[in-house]
Every structure is written in structure tokens, then in C-alpha cells.
């Protein structure tokens, strides 16, 4: 199924998505993207369906061709304070606020969102596989987050974040059991399974 260019032809639409909700460590990243109505890019798809190489190549195209884009991050401390859902929504609000062009309609991936300012929005389940602007936001959020996790991997190589990106892999959990947590871990998450 090919992705739709937009929902409304007469509105300035921003697509919104996040990356890293299910991780045990690292921030959650969110992105907002406004694409031209005529944007063409056959390879564009939900970031989860693409290889890392393809995502990084698409990121360059999106950043060059987008009318506006913004990526925001919410720290593990903030996630622990307000919970991951609210942190994801806050990240999306921050990314919308950072857009150089103000949208008048927002397409949000998923089924939960809090209204941003006075802008109309619609939640779209699996929206990153339906609309180009959401797919573009998913690629930016994911590539920026992966880059961040690779950077902090150097500080704590034992967790292998450059490979698992902070997700709850068996190895990541074994290393938490062995070495304890870091300032990058989300303490409100269940870091170790029940014995």
C-alpha cells in the first residue's frame, strides 16, 4: 500500500511520531515534519520496515525537502516523572513548537495525544504506514535517537547500546543485573524481569 501524501489538500499538515517508547534507557525522541503536498519519494516507509542505511539516506532527503521539521528529546528523568505516554506527547508538542512553519492540522501516529495549542489533530493507528508526513517523522525520530544511543554507548559500552539502542534485550537486562543502572536508565521501568 502506498503512503498518502496528505489528508487535506487545503491545510498545512504536520506529521508527528516518536521513537524509543519501549526502551529501558535513553530519552524518547519525537519529530514533527511538514512535507510539500507534491513530495515524491517511493522508498519512504514506516521506519521499522527500513534498514538503518536506508533510514539514514531518507533522513537526508526529508531534511532537504521538508517545508519544516523539528526533533525533540525528553530525558529519562522526565519520563520517570510524568510517565512514558505523557513524555512522548510532550516530545511531540516540543517538536511542533519548534517548527519554522506553523501547521494548522496535525496527523499523529498512534491513538493518544493531547491537543496542541489550538491546532486540530487526528490520531492514526499505524499512521507511519499510511501517511508520508508521519513516516518522515518516524524516520527522523528513530535516526536521531539511534545516533544519540551510539554516542552514549561510548560511556557505557558494557550495555551494547550501539546494537540494542536501549531496548530490553536479554543481553541488556543481563548487563543491568551485573553492572547496575546508569543515569540513562528509566528507573520507573521494570529494568529486570521477576526472578
Image (tube, grey):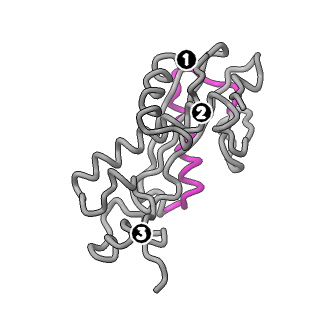
Could you tell whether 109 is left or right of 156 in the image?
A: right
Instruction: Indicate the position of residue 60 as horizontal and vertical percent values.
Output: 43, 23
Could you give the CA–CA distance between mark 3 and mark 1, rounded to whole angstroms? 41 Å
Q: Residue at x 50, y 23 (%)?
A: 62
Q: Toward the viewer: 150 or 41?
A: 41
The residue positioned farthest toward the top in the image shown: 38
- Above or below, 111 against 185 in this view is above
Label located before the other in sequence (2 or 1): 2
Q: Which residues are magenta?
A: 81-106
Residue with the mark numbered 1 = 67
Label 3 SS: helix
Residue 85 belongs to the span the image colors magenta: yes
Instruction: Indicate the position of residue 105 as horizontal and vertical percent values.
Output: 71, 28
Could you give the CA–CA distance between mark 3 and mark 2, rounded to whole angstroms? 29 Å
Instruction: Indicate the position of residue 63 as horizontal and vertical percent values.
Output: 46, 22
Classify 10 Å Cα crowding around label 1: few (below 14), some (14-19), many (20 and above): some
- Above or below, 183 against 35 in this view is below
Residue with the mark numbered 2 = 45
Q: Residue at x 52, y 58 (%)?
A: 22
Q: Main secondary structure of the magenta part?
A: helix
- Mark linked to residue 104: none
Q: Toward the viewer: 108 or 136?
A: 136
Label 1 SS: loop
- Above or below, 144 against 9 in this view is below
Amino acid at each position: 500500500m502506498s503512503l498518502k501524501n496528505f489528508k487535506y489538500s487545503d491545510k498545512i499538515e504536520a506529521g508527528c511520531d516518536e521513537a524509543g517508547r519501549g526502551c529501558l534507557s535513553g530519552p524518547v525522541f519525537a519529530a514533527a515534519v511538514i512535507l510539500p503536498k507534491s513530495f515524491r519519494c517511493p522508498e519512504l516507509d514506516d521506519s521499522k520496515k527500513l534498514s538503518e542505511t536506508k533510514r539514514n539516506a531518507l533522513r537526508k532527503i526529508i531534511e532537504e525537502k521538508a517545508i519544516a521539521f523539528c526533533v525533540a528529546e525528553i530525558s529519562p528523568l522526565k519520563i520517570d516523572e510524568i510517565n512514558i505516554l505523557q513524555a512522548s506527547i510532550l516530545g511531540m508538542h516540543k517538536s511542533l513548537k519548534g517548527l519554522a512553519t506553523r501547521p494548522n492540522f496535525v496527523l499523529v501516529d498512534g491513538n493518544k495525544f493531547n491537543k496542541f495549542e489550538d491546532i486540530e489533530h487526528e490520531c492514526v493507528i499505524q499512521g507511519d504506514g499510511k501517511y508520508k508526513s508521519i513516516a518522515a517523522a518516524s524516520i527522523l525520530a528513530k535516526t536521531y535517537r539511534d545516533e544519540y544511543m551510539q554516542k552514549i554507548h561510548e560511556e557505557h559500552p558494557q550495555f551494547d547500546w550501539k546494537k540494542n539502542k536501549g531496548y530490553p534485550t536479554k543481553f541488556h537486562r543481563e548487563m543491568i543485573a551485573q553492572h547496575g543502572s546508569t543515569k540513562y536508565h528509566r528507573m520507573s521501568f521494570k529494568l529486570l524481569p521477576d526472578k
